[in-house]
Amino acid sequence: MEVFEAMKERRSCRNFSTEPVGDETIEKILEAAGWAPSPLNMQPWGFIVVTAQDVKEKIFSEADRCRKWALEKSGWKWLGGYGLDFLKSAPAIIAITGDPKKTGVDMFMEEGGVGYQHACAAAIQNMHLAAHALGLGSLWFTFFDKKAIREILGIDPEKTPIGLVCLGKAGGDPTPAPRKDVKKKTIYIR
């Protein structure tokens, strides 16, 4: 699959079939994550693969708690109907954690200390592209409280939960999300 085609055709999936994702496939996706760029090549990421249904149920409960809280705080009515059942039905969920001690030189900058998060985001993008190339659907999910996810997944308190990637065969064709014209978001300084 050509890389530009993969970037354009990959979609966020919220409807998964029940077909399991094999360990070999997950390992290919994690290998792709490991090829992401990172500050000073520190590779600050870690991965936790969740296939246990009881743990997925706990993740769902935490996400639903956050959804209700956000609805109350924001007043955004769309949150009331935002379904989270895909967290229970996704055959695999991979948690990506970042190590703030591996952020690179930006740790010394006034507004620094985020390079490790950016590197983890690059790893997540590689995971999405690899999943798409392997015929899987995926979703980048961040609707959780870090403290609660640390507890649910047994994450070291010194590590930061960056995101969850839900993986599985799509249970249908994901709808393309509209994209804004990148020209309207670009400034050239020449």
Image (tube, helix red, strand yellow):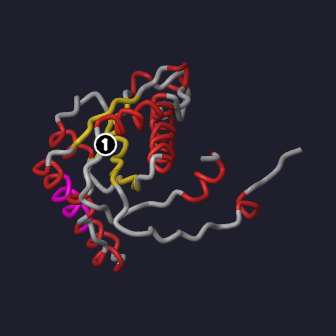
Q: Mark 1 points at which residue?
A: 94
In the rendered image, residue 45 lying in the magenta stretch gets the answer: no
Q: Quadrant of residue 64?
A: bottom left
In this rendering, position of residue 25 left or right of residue 183: left
Q: Quadrant of the C terminus?
A: top right
**In the figure, 46 relative to 89: above or below?**
above
Magenta highlight: main SS? helix
Q: Which residue: 65% across, 67% down? A: 180
Q: Which residue: 29% across, 66% down? A: 70
Q: Where is residue 5 in the image (x, y as percent from the top left)?
A: 63, 54
The local secondary structure at tag 1 comes to: strand
Q: In which quarter of the image is residue 29?
A: top left
Instruction: Give the magenta-colored segment's residue range.
Output: 59-67
**In the figure, 63 relative to 159: above or below?**
below
Q: Position of residue 21 (x, y in %)?
A: 29, 46
Q: Which amino acid does label 1 sit on?
A: Ile
**Viewer-proximal residue among 154 and 129:** 129
**In the figure, 141 relative to 15: above or below?**
above
Q: Position of residue 165 (x, y in %)?
A: 36, 48
**Viewer-proximal residue among 94 and 189:** 94
